[in-house]
Amino acid sequence: MDLEAARSVVSRFAVRTPLVPAPALGPDVWLKLETDQTTGSFKVRGALAKLASLTPEQRKAGVVAASAGNHGLGVAFAARALGIEARVFVPRDAPLVKVRGMEERGAKVEVTLEAGYDQAEERARTAAANTGEVFISPYDDPWVAAGNGGTLALEVLDQLPEIGSFVFPVGGGGLLAGIAEALRSTGRTADLVGVQSEASPAMTRSLEDGRAHETWDPAATFAEGLEGGVAAASVARARASGVRMALVSEAAIADAMRFAHARLGLRLEGSGAVPIAHQRSHPEASPTVLILTGSNVDDRVWRAVLGGVSDPQALFASPPS
């Protein structure tokens, strides 16, 4: 994992996001605002690092990705910045704000008939095998992990050298792997707390069960960016990192989104709100940094949550089993 090479390309095209105090969440709690990132999400970091690593032949072939939204936005942005053709497969209920953002950045978006992320990835991998395009994983790739978690953590360590805990969302585990590598490479220590929705706890269950849950049945969730299974290599990296996993309910995620709006002045998507949901009920060792990974939430969902909706079933049709 080449953190310096990743940081070089990320610093050229992405934003060095602010780290701000959040006294409403505790006396020594800080927020890493990836909501201010150029695509509204940290995922652009990993996409930039990966696409910049491609050979001239691979760039000419183009890239294909699967995404619930933010990874696809990152791939679309990075592809345009580096002059590469990009195609993104998304689940049928991917947030429109993210789909439109991909299209506006020049990516070709293909919407699958299925609701879950895992099915979109299967279709993207099949397409790559058939066309010669390079598949860009959202998490199971050392360059993506170096960009997403590695460059982000290096910024935090510069901004707050005395950090005690990182609290962050976990989907496939790329953010986690990069943070752990940044700590290892700098000789620093901090508690790692990974947070998932109860609706899609693949990493949590994989660590508990001693085997990778490579797929996970889709369920209605405000945190669609964390939905899906995990690769065996991602589980191994998570176990080696010493991360402590935590689960939060959909009601807690909705409450965190409302709290962020009312008390912090932030618009957060569900995936980005899970660290706040955890911190409000289980404060971590200080100084604590909550990584708020994204702000890309559909207006319909945002209005419903601010209006008091706490059950995603009220918004999303139940996906097929």
Image: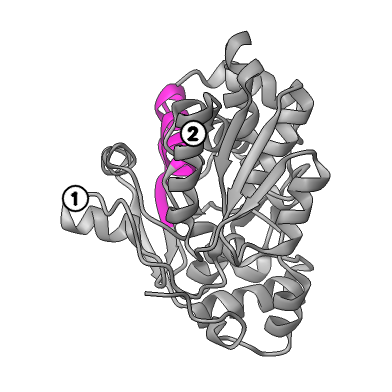
Residue that mark 1 sits on: 211
Helix, strand or loop at mark 1: loop
Residue that mark 2 sits on: 145
Vertical side of 297 occupied by 315: above or below: below
Which circle's residue, 1 or 2, is located before the other in the chain?
A: 2
Q: Crowding at label 1, few (<14), some or many (≥20) Cα neighbours within 10 Å?
A: some
Q: Residue at point 60% right, 74% down? A: 256
Helix, strand or loop at mark 2: helix
Name the outermost residue toward the right. Answer: 104
Q: Residue 149, percent across and down?
A: 53, 37
Q: Residue 259, percent across and down?
A: 67, 76
Name the outermost residue toward the left. Answer: 210
Q: What's the magenta region?
A: 174-194
Q: Nearer the viewer, residue 228 or 179?
A: 228
Vertical side of 101 occupied by 250: above or below: below
Question: Can the viewer see residue 157 in this picture?
Answer: no
State which quarter of the image contains the N terminus.
top left
| 24 inside magenta stretch | no
